Amino acid sequence: MKNLFLTVVLILGFSLTLIGQNTPLTPPGSGETQQQMRDSRDRDIQANQRVREIQDPRVSPQYDIDGPRGRTIYSGASNIDGTTINYENSTLPRTTHPVFIPARLSKEQLRLISPSIEDSTKYATFLKLPHTGLIKLFPEMDCSSKNVVRVDGPCEKYIPFSNAYSFRKIMYPQKVLADLRLKENTLFTDGVFSNGMILALGDIPLETVSANIAGMDFLFEFKSARENNEIIAKSKELGQGIKVENYQYSNHFTAFENTTYVLRTIAYRGSITKTIPGFPWAYNLLEGDKRIDVIIAFRIVRKDSDGSLTLLWKELQRKDSPKINLSKKEQAEYSSQQ
């Protein structure tokens, strides 16, 4: 009797094992088998990796212009965080990187924010080089406030976030996290908890710009700050402009067509705690931002009647930036400015 009981248990266990191998992981009627679930999981993993690549196409946190780099990334679809152009199934011009904006845009807005086919074609050879791109910037417009969004007059074609760009993250961010922003006809590099400077080189080919040309020594050798008081002092100094021999270094410059500039942004690592009125929690304003030290050469290749600029750019260097710890008082001062 005992042997018969053991035999029944073994047969029952074997049967359940076979059933489990052929049973879908989801309830009957769902239509998804184990293989389909695995395929779905793999697609999710690839999609998440794709989003990370779009937001952060660099494979190394620190490299020089001649160092290693990941492959060119193009958007394959829209993602959960914002709008990216699907270049694979679009007549829109390709750029070295996708147009990523943390807001949903209409087809017309996507068309407006995309560089012209003429410019994309003209600079196609240059854009095949690593560390390059072609973007558009629109002037800052007073089209939205805390409680009102205007859609009349010039605001009819307003594109959110289109007046600021981050070369560190290859995207259009909120302006406090930008490396470069456009207000009226002036370029600014004055992101939060950063030191930035711009050098105007004049009408010279972007291809000729390197660390070895005249005027670049000061920009490359400029010492980053080590404490908050230094950041503030350097920002004030760059706001007033620093003249070395025949070159001017400033955190703002007038935007001229067919002019080449060099930008350096030192985005310091740290934490700025910010609260939301009416909510019980706080967040780090710098969370998710790529806080590094980057040098970009760019040329304004087009200036349209609406005030927008088309910028052709290449990266010269990126490296780690210092981490600076802020006191609660210093964090509050930064937070109140935003």
Image (spheres, rainbow, N blue to C red):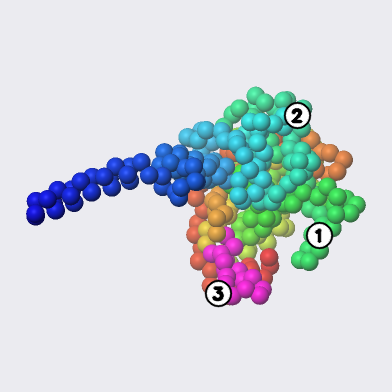
Q: Residue at x 55, y 55 (%)?
A: 288
Q: Residue at x 65, y 24 (%)?
A: 125
Q: Residue at x 68, y 67 (%)?
A: 337
Q: Are marks 3 and 2 in contact (CB under 8 Å)?
A: no
Give the residue type at disc 2.
Ile
Q: CA distance from mark 2 to mark 1?
A: 31 Å
The reply to whether residue 31 is in sight is yes
Graded by Cα atoms within 10 Å as few (under 14), some (14 to 19) or many (20 or more), the crowding at tag 1 reads few
- Image-quadrant location for residue 260: top right
Q: CA distance from mark 1 to mark 3?
A: 33 Å
Q: Which mark is residue 117?
A: 2
Task: Please tell me whether residue 155 is drawn above or below residue 209 in the rendered image.
Answer: below
The reply to whether residue 46 is in sight is no
Q: Which residue is mark 1?
A: 149
Of mark 2 and mark 1, the one earlier in the sequence is 2
Q: Which residue is mark 3?
A: 328
Graded by Cα atoms within 10 Å as few (under 14), some (14 to 19) or many (20 or more), the crowding at tag 2 reads few
